[in-house]
Image: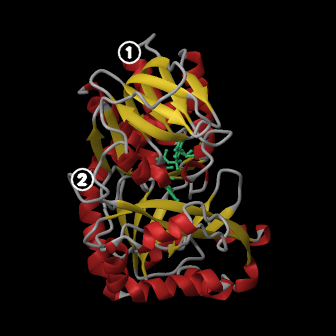
Amino acid sequence: MPHFGDTSGLRRPADSYDTIIVGAGIIGLAVAREVLARRPGSRVLVVEREDAAARHQSSHNSGVIHAGVYYAPGSLKARLCVDGAARLYGFCERRAVAVKRVGKLIIARDEHELPALEEIGRRANANGVAGMRRLDAGGLREIEPHAIGVAALHSPNTAIVDFADVCARLADDLGAAGGDLRFGWEVARVAAGARSIRLRSAAGDEAEGARAVFCAGLWSDRLAVLAGADPDPRIVPFRGGYLRLAPRRRALVRGLIYPVPDPRLPFLGVHLTPRVDGDVLLGPSALLVGARDAYALSTLRAADVRDTLAWPGTWRMMARWWRTGIGELRLAASREAFAAQASRYVPALRGEDLLPGFGGVRAQAVARDGRLVDDFLLCATPRAIHVRNAPSPAATSSLALAARIADAADAI
Ligand SMILES: Cc1cc2nc3c(=O)[nH]c(=O)nc-3n(C[C@H](O)[C@H](O)[C@H](O)COP(=O)(O)OP(=O)(O)OC[C@H]3O[C@@H](n4cnc5c(N)ncnc54)[C@H](O)[C@@H]3O)c2cc1C
């Protein structure tokens, strides 16, 4: 680890910027936009290790603009999701990004789930989510004729979008506002001095900024530690696997159909999700995997496995959630298990209606004590801000979260 103030180990003269942002996912790009809006004409550089923007979480997700229904009142997730969704609708309208307000049903299958459904309704009201309605079994069938349950909450303002399209427009804005975006630039070393911070890429290129903002998603803990931060929490990769509904069966689903989630977990459960391109997804599962880029289930990386297994929080988490983990393994192994899960809500759905889909990997922070960090989390190191936990609904919240991150960066 470099000593702060010691930038002597870095070679080649560095390009100099006011703000350097690491990571061209939706959060990094939204931060760049916010910084340039606050300080027009300032020198902003975004560095990204891949050869294009939005190669990881920001393009491998459910594509849902959440309304802010679930989150603990007062949490960053609750506030920034409601604010972020409003900002995102405005952005998409101005930039002609397709959005469909298909609405969402959260369905209670039996009486046991009613208290949890009531609690979600209370949270939605406390969070200021507009238009929420409670429906009985008949009311929910008027909205989703093929779905069943004893009661539901309907959120008419939940929508779908392709977040990769949002990222493409944000990258356009960055260029139009005079910012630089460099691909194939993997930050490998960080050295902060009294007035500036220097980054060095794996290829040996350098850039110097008055401040840096790290929005590195699945690798955010490693970069934070490289910059001198506490290793707690660590990113533990949870793969979300999706299947697709065969086109001939798409009429089974009109909008978003969700289960009542386990309130102790930050995952929302397997849901049915129409896409803006007309596809209907089933998923995601939530399986602990052996690589931070495990888009294929079989991908294993020794360093990632080591990091996950060496973290005491992983073992504490597994001791608590092993039963849930076995259920997720079953989903990963069997299309029939996936179909059985979804057919609890849409009984006409069968295994033969499902086609292969894709996988996304969540950057979920796990604390040393085994807690899955629920809220968005930032931390600071000399001349830098780090996004340490930005799982769902961070894509929805991105424009509001970016304002929050820019506030923290302005205090440097
Ligand atoms: C399965 C799944 C479903 C989801 N569904 C939803 C949803 O429906 N709605 C919603 O709001 N949210 C959803 N999310 C969450 C949302 O996708 C993420 O919160 C959001 O995309 C996070 O954006 P990000 O910019 O932080 O991360 P990313 O998009 O992962 O971007 C991080 C970037 O940092 C780059 N990087 C990493 N290390 C370095 C380095 N050393 N040097 C340079 N660059 C580096 C990476 O290459 C990457 O491009 C979902 C996530 C998943 C995985």
Can you tell which quarter of the image residue 179 is in? top right
What residue appears at the point 24 percent right and 53 percent down from the top-left corner?
Answer: 75
Residue 272, how many percent across, how many down?
Answer: 58, 69
**Color theme of the render:** secondary structure
Q: In this view, does 198 lie to the left or right of 244?
A: left
Q: Which residue lies furthest to the front in this view?
A: 8
Residue 214, how many percent across, how many down?
Answer: 42, 39
Can you tell which quarter of the image residue 231 is in? bottom left
Q: Which residue lies furthest to the top in this view?
A: 41
Residue 71, how many percent across, how many down?
Answer: 30, 59
Q: Nearer the viewer, residue 365 or 185?
A: 185
Q: In this view, does 18 lie above or below 383?
A: above
Q: In this view, does 92 lie to the left or right of 268?
A: right
Q: Do the residues labelled 2 and 1 touch (CB within 8 Å)?
A: no
Mark 2 within 8 Å of ligand 1, using the beta carbon: no
Is any part of residue 369 visible from this angle?
yes
Per the image, the residue denoted by label 2 is: 75
Is any part of residue 29 visible from this angle?
no
Q: Mark 2 and mark 1: span between their CA atoms?
A: 28 Å
Residue 404, how many percent across, how many down?
Answer: 30, 36
Q: What residue type is labelled 1?
A: Arg
Q: In this view, does 45 lie above or below 250?
A: above
Q: Which amino acid does label 2 sit on?
A: Ser
Q: Quadrant of the C terminus?
A: top left
Badge 2: how crowded within 10 Å, few (<14), some, or many (20+)?
some
Q: Quadrant of the N terminus?
A: top left
Q: Residue furthest right?
A: 248
The image's mark for residue 77 is: none
Q: Is residue 339 left or right of residue 408?
A: right
- Number of the front mark, 2 or 1: 1
